[in-house]
Image (tube, rainbow, N blue to C red):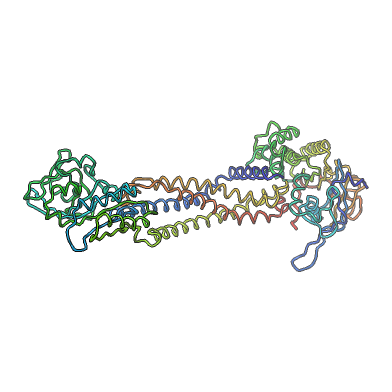
Amino acid sequence: MSVWSSLVGSVVEAAQELRIHRTRVLLSLIGVAVAVCAISSVVGLGAIAEQAMREQNEKNGGRAATLYASAYSSDGAVLDMVDVSAAFDAAATRYSIDYTSRNAYAQQSVQYADGTSVVDTTLVDIDYGTMHRVDVTEGSWFTDLDTRRLAPALVINSTVYQRLGSPDLSTHPTLQLNADTDVVGVIVGVTHRAYEEGYESMYILADAYTAVASPEALSQVSPNYELWVPEDASAELVPLLQRDIASALGEGVQVDVNRQDYGAYGEQDFFGPIRLLVGGVAALVLLLGALGLVNISLVTVRQRVREIGIRRSFGATAGRVFFAVMMESVVATLVAGVFGVAAAVAIVQNPTVQGWIGQGGITDTPAFPLDAAVLGLLAATAVGALAGLLPALVAVRVRVIDAIRF
Amino acid sequence: MRAVTTSILRLDGVTRTVELPDGAALDILRGVDLEVSVGDHVSIVGRSGSGKTTLLNLLGLLDKPTSGSIYFDGVSTDSLSSRSRDRTRGRHVGFIFQQFNLLAGRTALENVVTPLLYASGKQFWRREKLALEMLDRVGLGHRARSMPETLSGGEQQRVAIARALVRGPRLILADEPTGALDIETGATVMALLDDVAEQSGAALITITHDINVAALARRHYRLDRGVLSALAELGGAALGAAPGIASVVSPPAALLPSSAPKELAR
C-alpha cells in the first residue's frame, strides 16, 4: 500500500468519523477549545500586561536601550550648555543615532493669576516625547514649528493646567515665566500621569530655555543627554560615546555614559517571572482540558469496538486503526484549537479587556502575539495526540470476530 | 485433491486450543483439514458451540492455529506478520456477517467504499466509482445515498455483499448470511451471493445453521465438537440423524428461529 493512499485514506476515514460522531466530538472538544482559548488568552493578555509594564518603565527610563550621557567639570566650574550640546550632537551624528534629546532639570518660577509657584521643569528636545512615550492628553507634544516660536512652547502637566483653569488650547493660553522678567510661554500640550496629582511640572525645549533663562538659572542646570540606540549595539556604543564626547569637551571635563532604561537592571529577562506565572496557569488549564478529552475518548472508543472490528475484517491493519483513532483526535483538537485561538483573539483584542489589563497606560497596544496563536494550536495538537493515544491503544487490541458478533 | 495452483486456502491438521481459567486446556478445533479452490462454494454447518467462530477466525486470518498450518495461495501463513495477514485479508478475503454490520451513519455507498480505503492505487483513487458499480451489480445503485437504517433487511445484506466483494476478493466468508432474514429474502440474497461470487471467480465459504442455505453450496462440511467432516450428501433423512455420523447436519431451517441463538464467545 502506498504511503500516499494510506495517508489520504486515513484522513478520509477520520473526517467521516468526525461527521458521524459530531455531537460527541463537539462535546469533548468544547473543553479543548476552552482550554486553548484560555492558554492563548493568558499569553496574549500577558503580552499586554508586559507591554503596559514596559511602557511604564519606558516613561521613566526611556525605551530600550536609552543611554544617558552627562558631563561635568572636574573643578566644579559651570560648563557652557551650548558647547556641551554641540559635543553631544557631534557624537550622535557620528554614530547615526536618530533619536536624541537633552534632559536637564530646572526649577522655574511661574506666575499664576493667584500667585507664583515653582514648577519642576524638564528641559528636553523634540525626540524626548517619543523616547519616553510622553502621553499628551490635550494639545500635542513639541514639533519642529515650536522651535521657531519666539515665546517658548510649554507642555505642562495636568496640575498646572488645572491651576490655570483648564483653558482651551486652541486659544493659545500662556503662562508667565519668571515673574520678574515678563517672559511668557505658550502652552501647546498637557500631559497626565496619575501619580503627579498635586505636583506641578512641565516640559520646555532646551534651546528655548537657554534663550530665556537668566545666567544664574542656567548655571544651575547640568546638561545631560539621552540617546536611543539599538539594544544590541548599546554595550558597544557606551565607551565610544564616552571617549568621543570627552575628547570634544577637552581636559578637565568628566563624561559619563551609561544605560538607564529598564533593560539595564534586568540581569537576564526582565519579564521572566511574569511569563513563568502565566505559563504555569496556562499549562494547568490545558492539563484539565486534556484530562476531560481522554476521559470522553476512552468511553467512546469502547462504544466503537464493533465498528473497529468491521474495519479490521476489511483489511485495516492495527497500525491503520491506531493511526485513524489518533488522527481523529488530532484533527478534532486542531479544529477546536483554531476556534479556541479565534476566541482568544476576540477576547484579547477587546478594548475593554485591554483597558483593564493595561490600566489605561498603553499607547502601543501589541497585536495578538503570534506565539500565543502558535502555542495554542501546538498545545491543541499535542493534547489531541496524547488524548488519542490511550483510545488508539484500546482500539488496536479489539478482537475482531468477538467485536463483530456482539 | 485439487492442484496446488488453484488452491486458495488450505487448512492442514489445524487445531486450536484455549487455556481455561483453571489451567485446563480446551480443544476447540481438532485436526481440521480443508481445501478451498477457485470457484468453490463450500458450506459448513454446525450447532452452537461446535467451533464455528473459531474456525471463521482462522479462515479469515484473524487468528493463528495452535498447531497445523494454514496456506493462502499455497503460501504458509504461519510466518506472516500480523500486518501481512491484515493486508492479505483486506486484499483477498471478503466478510459477510449475520447482522449485516453496516457502519451506522454512513450511506450505502460509504459502506461499500470502506474496504477500498485500505486499498491502494487505482482501487483507492477510484473507490467511489468501483463502489457504485458494485452497488449496481447487487441491484442497489438507486439506493447508494440511503442510510442503512432506511433499507430493508434484504437490502442491507445486499449492501454488505457489495461491500464484501468490492475489492474483488478471492475468498468470501459468509457467517450466517441469512440468519437475520426471512426465508424468502434469505433465498434471494443467497442466490445473489452465489451468483456474484461465481461471476467473480471467488471461492465462497458459508457458515450456517440453515440447511437450505447450506444446500446452495456444492460441497458440504459439518463441524461437530471441533471436528470438521465432509458430507457426501445434504438433507433428506440424514438431517435428523444422531450426531457423530458423517452425513448428519444440524436440524432443518424450518425448525430453527431465523435469529438463532448466538454462539457463545470463546
Give percent across and percent down for residue A68: 28, 56
- In depth, the one of A244 and B150 nearer the eye is A244
Residue A304 makes an appearance in the image: yes
- The residue at the far top in this view is B142
- In depth, the one of A320 and A204 nearer the eye is A204
Check the image and report above or below for B119 versus B57: above
Give percent across and percent down for residue A11: 62, 44
- In depth, the one of B131 and A93 nearer the eye is A93
- In depth, the one of B46 and B93 nearer the eye is B93
- The residue at the far bottom in this view is B22
Q: Quadrant of the N terminus of chain A?
A: top right
Check the image and report above or below for B123 versus B67: above
In this rendering, position of residue A373 left or right of residue A4: left
Residue A157 makes an appearance in the image: no
In this rendering, position of residue A98 left or right of residue B112: left
In this rendering, position of residue A364 left or right of residue A155: right
- The residue at the far front in this view is A251
In this rendering, position of residue B47 left or right of residue A382: right
Q: Quadrant of residue A146?
A: top left
User: How many labels, in total?
Assistant: 0
Give percent across and percent down for residue A179: 7, 50
Give percent across and percent down for residue B100: 72, 44
